Image (cartoon, rainbow, N blue to C red):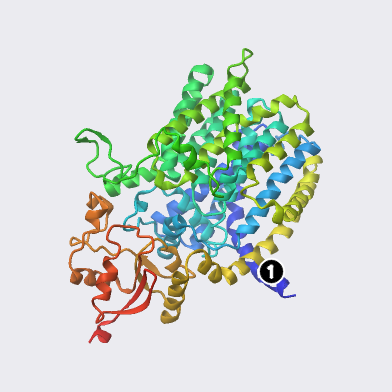
Amino acid sequence: MEEITIAGAGSISVLIYLLCQLPAIAGALLLARYFRCRNRFEYLAAAGLLFTAVMIAIPGVLGMAGLLTPSGVMFASWGFGAAAFLAKPKRPAAGLPFQPFTPAELLLTAVAWGFLVCQWRAFSLVPTVGTDSQLYHIFYPATWLRTGSIERMTQHGMMTATYPFYGELIYAWQMAPLLHDFFARSFQFYFLGLAWITLAAGALAAGFRRIEALAAGLLLVFAGVVFRNASVSNTDLMTGAMLLGGVMWFVIAARRNSCGAFLLAGLSFGIAAGMKYLGLMLAPPAFLLGALVIWFGRPQCRRNLWSAFAAAAVAGSPCFIVNWITYGNPVFPARIGIGSWNLFEHFMTVQAPAIGWRWAAWGFFVNEQENNVSFGTALLVVSAVAAGGIAAGCLRRCFRRTAAGAVAAGFVLLLLLQLAIYPTMTQPRQIVPLVMLAMFPAAVLFRAARGRAWIVAVAALVLAGAESFRQYAYGSKGVELLVHIAVCFVIFGVPARIAKPKYLWGAAVLFAVVLVPDAGLRLVRSDAVASQLRIALLSPEDETARLEIRRRTGGEPCVIAYIGVNYYLFSGDEFENRVIAVPVSESGRELLSDYRTFEEMRTPGSFEAWLARLRREGVRFVICDLRLPPAPGAEQEAEWARSHPEWFTPVIYRNGFYCFELKTEADHE
């Protein structure tokens, strides 16, 4: 009975969340009709991409106007849905032919989505604990929702204030309805599902059989480095989904010479570039390579190809225009120049070496750590790329082989570029977008079955299990996974086999009846266990400080001066606290562009100047976490606070973690 009560209470929050999301989703589905899709995979891929653009555009516009609040997002979502309803195409909606799934195809679909739902349910109870999530992926949206405006917050020792921020806008959209991170912290599973749909759409357009497209999609979902990184609130998988989407829409556009598909390709590449600097490094070269292949291989597409250039430029430029205005360099902190000549005056000197073209790259990406590339996934990627190259070299040329070979060649060129340029400090998960891209030529591996559906299905299941067995506990969670697959088989089964709208609506209602109470139950449970999990996954010191600050303030908003990596943890249950980095330099300047190096930024001035800044900002607590020093001289604030007990009262003093309360003028006297 208690479980039912908890699920009911949580379901109210879930319904409020859906009340904000569904109008925008409906609007994206309506606008997707404009793109003349040939099948439901293309239609859902187009709608998913448009919804992604909405999740970026609406918070961005609201944030610039100072209206990024729960009510602002709710009204904007309904406004967009209403506008899309009025602007929808006048032609009938029933333009997509019904193509019933075979049992083998239905099995692969149920396994893929059962695995996704099972993973989402498992990780939905885990609080936000990732370093990058704490630094900016979730912390930035929390701060924006507190102030209502988008701002770039300098964090000492970090370049986060200069990063592209489309991923953070998406997280802000997900956090806004409830002022809670429950749906945001595992929202990358949405992008994994979207990547599955888009890959299937692209493979079908290229000429692969549907069972082969679904088999390649299954390998994408079960790639350990991919689904493990979907469980945390980073943006690598978002970037990969958009990069894969751009390539797949290029395939569709080249096959049909479709202006709409070219627009979607450009939109997807532009969003990928605006997700993070990894996307900026991969998306433009991938776009140019694809454009060159289409320009010379499909001359009839040249006119429509320009629409992709325009869409990519419009979609990808805002982040870098903001950087140009703020820092005087669109790709700050990078230096662009030759010798002593610099194209942009402002840049920073940072030691961030790339791994280079060395054998050490294999060990960097492929190892036994569960969040990295397993040997099975690496072998599958190599086989897929080789198969794509071999297919392209066959004497009997066709569009399918050319597309697979072009993507395989693009994978190799992008990998070489990434090894030469991208810094190793971003961890091995930087390979996620390329692993996702490699799953398109993986469809070639199933051509040998010559359309025998069950042979393809069994081979795909075996390969999926082989590439993921080190990163998924099949022994302890296998039964749970089978239950999820069975439920998805039932939900998808009837509408995938019978062409009647009432069955589709029935499946949607059944899905909602199953998922809404379960999500509500997990939302409440996640709050109940969050403190214990933070102690285990972050540290006892962090959680003790958070609870002590809440006790001393009575839950009222406060300002915290912080040096460390867990910014988001101290922002409060409803993002009420302001967590800032207060400059210690003599100049007190805050922008990264005011310094050439982090050492210069952290060169201490006087204690009196620093104290005056604390008081001017209204700081009540000072936290210094030296266990993972984020910047040179990270101990400076702690040394000042310890040497001036007349101003600072120790709150926690343990294991390199220091928390002080700043006394008021009255207490000081």
Q: Position of residue 463 (x, y in %)?
A: 68, 38
Q: Residues within 10 Å of mark 1 (few under 14, many from 20)?
A: many
**Amino acid carrying mark 1 in the image:** Ala
Answer left or right for 511 relative to 61: right
Q: Which of 39 and 78 is in front in this view?
A: 39
Q: Is residue 45 visible?
A: no
* Secondary structure at numbered mark 1: helix
Q: Position of residue 417 (x, y in %)?
A: 42, 32
Quadrant of the frame with the N terminus: bottom right
Residue 420, picture quadrant: top left
Q: Which of 568 and 300 is in front in this view?
A: 568
- Number of labels in the image equals 1
Name which residue lies at 51% across and 22% down.
294
Residue 449, picture quadrant: top right
Answer left or right for 174 relative to 8: left
Name which residue lies at 69% across and 69% down.
7
**Height in image: 577 above or below 36?**
below
Q: Can residue 547 be seen in this view?
A: yes
Q: Where is residue 123 in the image (x, y as percent from the top left)?
A: 60, 58
Q: Which of 367 and 640 is in front in this view?
A: 367
Name which residue lies at 74% across and 59% down.
513
Name which residue lies at 80% across and 43% down.
500
Q: Position of residue 587 (x, y in %)?
A: 18, 60
For mark 1, what is the residue?
7
**Height in image: 364 above or below 294?**
below
**Height in image: 203 above or below 578?**
above
